[in-house]
Image (cartoon, rainbow, N blue to C red):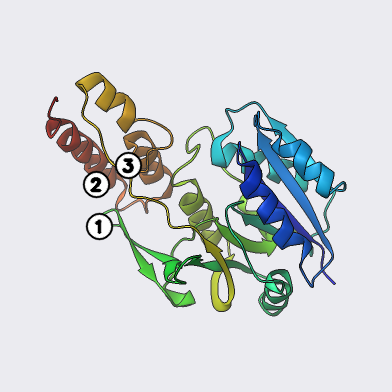
Amino acid sequence: MSRVYVLVPVHNRRPTTLRFVDCLQRQTHTNWQLVLIDDGSDDGTAAAVRQVLPGVTILQGDGSLWWAGALQLGYRWLTDGRAQPHDLVLIINDDTTFEPDLLATGAALIGDHPRSMLHAQCRDEGDDELLDDGIGVDWRRLAFRPVHASDEVDCLSTRGLLMTVEGIRRTGGFRPRWLPHYLSDYEFTLRAGRRGIRPLLDPAFFVRSPRKPTAQERADGLASTVASLFAKNNPVNPAAWFMFALLASPWVYKPWNLMQVGVRTLVRLARHKPR
């Protein structure tokens, strides 16, 4: 039975994280190790998890890691000799819930496709509507589209991503200095694919998650608009898109995509209407 290392970044979501741990403890595949990357929580998340799961490994951050920084900390811990190459690593959000056979299903699928990265289909926890599957990239438009066949996938989210330890080692990890949060998972999985780790989709491997509300832009003033636009947790942050275009675009599209990011940023700022 393969050992599964479960990497979970958390920050101040104690009830959510405990619900996740409860799902993990119900797994039929029992050979797993939770690696909790706690990025400066002050609500007692880490202590609460340790109380119900004394064997948890906790890696501590100071609140500045964000998603990619937390996963890079987990990557360094995982690849320093603790894990065997054939062991598995699951990167997953703590706001997901899942069936007791998630790890068993994933381990079996990766066993059949060891040079793959298996993406967990994400369904709405309320109505079971599909929220997240594979992603295709239109490099000419620098845009993403949902796809549902493994051979059409360009990149994947890390809301639930399973691969071998050897596979994640081959990727080189995350790049938090350049992509601390949004788009870090797409760049990571694009790079993994280019290094021989093939995307794999299977509807039997799935999680559930709450539907996230659509972000609303505010226009209280130009300075606050600029600050909001460039916030690390803004999915349209121009700095993140610039670095994604620079790091991930094929060379033939790189200059064009960098220009597109600049034009989009100017258009957003030009549409600013003070209240």
In the rendered image, which residue does mark 1 sit on? Answer: 140
In the rendered image, which residue does mark 2 sit on? Answer: 256
In front of the other: 158 or 222: 222
Label 1 secondary element: loop
Location of the N terminus (image quadrant): bottom right
In the rendered image, which residue does mark 3 sit on? Answer: 236
In this rendering, the count of numbered labels is 3
How packed mark 1 is, by other alpha carbons closer than 10 Å (few <14, some 14-19, many 20 or more), is few
The first of marks 3 and 1 along the sequence is 1
Residue at 28% from the left image edge and 41% from the top image edge: 216
Residue at 78% from the left image edge and 61% from the top image edge: 25
Location of the C terminus (image quadrant): top left
Q: Amino acid at mark 1?
A: Arg
The image shows residue 166 at horizontal and vertical percentages of 73, 59
- Distance from the alpha carbon under mark 3 to that under mark 2: 18 Å
For the residues bearing labels 1 and 2, Cβ distance under 8 angstroms: yes
How packed mark 3 is, by other alpha carbons closer than 10 Å (few <14, some 14-19, many 20 or more), is some
Residue at 59% from the left image edge and 65% from the top image edge: 197
Write down the quadrant of residue 144 in the picture: bottom left
Residue at 70% from the left image edge and 38% from the top image edge: 45
Q: Is residue 98 above or below residue 38?
A: below
The image shows residue 37 at horizontal and vertical percentages of 69, 40
Task: From the viewer's perspective, tell me whether residue 24 is left or right of residue 214.
Answer: right
Q: Amino acid at mark 2?
A: Trp
The label on residue 216 is none
Q: Is residue 130 above or below residue 260?
A: below
- Distance from the alpha carbon under mark 3 to that under mark 1: 18 Å
